[in-house]
Image: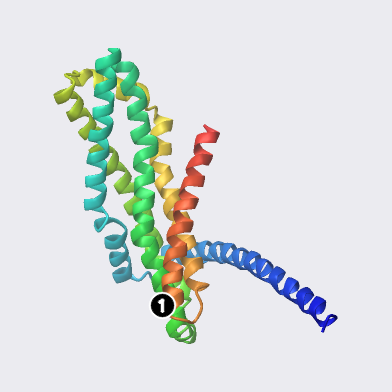
Amino acid sequence: MPLGRPLLSHGAAQRRRRPSRRNELHWLERIGLGAITLKLCVELYLGVLLGRAQLDLPALAQALRQAGLSVFPALTLVSAAAGVILGQQAARLIAEIDLPGLILVPVIYAVTMELVPLLVGVLVAGRAGVALAARQASLVASGQVDGLLVSGLNPIQFTTGPVLPAMLAMSFALSIWGSAVALGAAMFWLVVAADVPPYLFNDALRQALAPADLLEALGKPLIFALVVALIATANGIAAGRDIAGVSRAATDTMIGAVTAILLIDLGFVLAS
C-alpha cells in the first residue's frame, strides 16, 4: 500500500497534465478549422463568379435578416441613446470650459471610430455569429453532416458560405447607419440643450475625421464580421455529437467573438 500510493499519485499527476495538452490541441484545431473555413468560402465564391458553383440564395436571405434586419432596431436604439449620452456629457463640459470645438472633436472621433464599430461587431456576433455556431453544432449533433458529405456537399460551404457575405454586407451597412444615428442624436442634443450652433458641430466633424479615419471606421466591422464567422464555424464543428454541444458552441462563440473584437480593436488603437 505505501508503494501503491506514490504510483497512484504519479499517475494522477500525469492525468492532470494531459487535459492541458488536449485543450491546447483543441484550440489549435479550432484555429485550423477557421483557416479551412476561410479557404473553402473563398473557393465557393470564386466558383460562383466563374459559374461553377451555386450559392444558397434562401440561406443568404435568411442570413441577411439575422445579421442585419433583426439587429437594426437594437442598433438604432443603442446608437441614439449613446449619442444623447455623449451629447449630454459634451454639453456639460462645454458649459464649464466654454471650448466647444475642443470638446466636440474627440467626442465625434470616439463615436465614429470606437463606439459604433464595437456595437456593430458585438450585436452581429450575438445574433448572426451565435446562430451560425448553433446551426453548425446542430448539424454535427444530429448527424446531418454525414448526409451532406454523402450528397457531395461541403458542410462548411453549405452553412458558412451564404452567411459570411451577409454578415459582411450588413456590418458595413449597420456601421454607416449607426454612425449617422449616433452623431445625429448627439448633434440634436447639443443644439437643443447646449445652444451649440450646427455649423460648429459640422466644423468639428470635418476636423475629427479624415478620409483614412472613415475607411478604418468602415473596415473594422468587416474584419469583426469575418473573424466572428470563422470563430462560429470552428466552434460549431468542434462541438461534438452530444446535444449539449449546441449550447456550448453558442456560448464559446459569444465569448470568443467579443474577446477577438476587443483585441482587434486594441490592435487598431496601438497601430494608429
Could you classify mark 1 by the number of other residues whose Cα lies within 10 Å: few (under 14), some (14-19), or many (20 or more)? many
Q: Residue at x 66, y 70 (%)?
A: 19
Name the residue carrying label 1. Answer: 138
Secondary element at tag 1: helix
Q: Residue furthest top?
A: 98
Q: Nearer the viewer, residue 22 or 158?
A: 22
The residue at the far right in this view is 3
How many tags in the picture?
1
Q: Nearer the viewer, residue 84 or 217?
A: 84
Q: Could you say which quadrant of the image residue 188 lies in? A: top left
Q: Residue 94: percent from the left, percent from the top?
A: 27, 18
- As drawn, the residue found furthest toward the front would be 2
- Residue extending farthest left: 192
Tell me: residue 69, above or below residue 107.
below
Asked whether, in this view, residue 246 is left or right of residue 32, the answer is left
In the visual, does 38 lie left or right of 75?
right
Residue 66 visible (yes or no): yes
* Quadrant the N terminus occupies: bottom right
In this picture, residue 164 sits left or right of residue 58: right
Q: Residue at x 48, y 85 (%)?
A: 146
The location of residue 92, given as percent across then percent down, is: 25, 22
**Residue occupying image coordinates x 37% and y 69%:** 55
Above or below residue 215? Residue 44 is: below
Q: Quadrant of residue 56?
A: bottom left
Q: Is residue 68 above or below residue 101?
A: below
What amino acid is labelled 1 in the image? Ser
In this rendering, is residue 216 above or below 227? Answer: above
Residue 182 image point, x, y percent: 26, 37
Q: From the viewer's side, name the closer residue of 25 and 178.
A: 25
